[in-house]
Amino acid sequence: MGIISWIILGVVAGFIGSKIVNKTGQGMIMDIVLGIVGAIVGGLIFSALGASGVTGLNIYSLIVAVVGAVVVLWAYHQFSARRTL
């Protein structure tokens, strides 16, 4: 998968994941970064469970990336909330 595909998948997964987790989003750049990291994390999670990870620019990969983005965003919010206390 090329860098443009990862960016497109990251934008969409980050946007959807941020809407699921906190309803407002993190901003365009943070959504892209967290979406790409989420795609990698989602691929690792799905691979550990015996399924295939991100396979390309398709609906299944988007679902994997969104699951990973939700996990990454949840962890991000847990750690950022502790710093503000």
Image: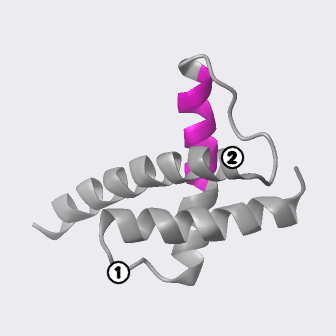
Is the residue 74 above or below the residue 60 in the image? Answer: below
User: Which residue lies at the image location 62% right of the left edge and 49% below the top edge?
Assistant: 39
User: Which residue lies at the image location 54% right of the left edge and 66% below the top edge?
Assistant: 14
| Residue corresponding to mark 1 | 24
2 or 1: tag closer to the N-terminus: 1
Circle 2/circle 1 CB separation < 8 Å: no
Question: Could you tell me the amino acid type at mark 1?
Answer: Thr
Instruction: Specify the farthest residue to the left.
Output: 85
Q: Left or right? Give the position of 4 relative to 64.
A: right
Place of residue 9 in the rendered image (x, y in percent of width and height, measured from the top left):
70, 61
Instruction: Specify the farthest residue to the top.
Output: 50
Main SS of the magenta part reads helix
Magenta stretch holds residue 64: no
Q: Left or right? Give the position of 65 relative to 73.
A: right
Q: Left or right? Give the position of 30 relative to 22.
A: right
Magenta stretch holds residue 40: yes
Q: In what quadrant of the picture does the C terminus appear? A: bottom left
| Residue corresponding to mark 2 | 61
Is the residue 39 above or below the residue 34 in the image? Answer: above
User: Which residue lies at the image location 59% right of the left edge and 44% below the top edge?
Assistant: 64
Q: Would you call the spot at circle 1 few (<14 residues within 10 Å), some (14-19), or many (20 or more)?
A: few
User: Which residue lies at the image location 56% right of the left edge and 40% below the top edge?
Assistant: 42
Instruction: Specify the farthest residue to the right.
Output: 2
Write down the quadrant of residue 74 in the picture: bottom left
Place of residue 71 in the rendered image (x, y in percent of width and height, measured from the top left):
41, 47
Total labels: the figure holds 2
21 or 28, which lies in front? 21
In terms of secondary structure, where does tag 2 sit? Answer: helix
Tell me the distance, in whole angstroms, between the alpha carbons under discs 2 and 1: 23 Å
User: Magenta span covers which residues?
Assistant: 37-47
Question: Could you tell me the amino acid type at mark 2?
Answer: Ser
Place of residue 79 in the rendered image (x, y in percent of width and height, measured from the top left):
27, 55
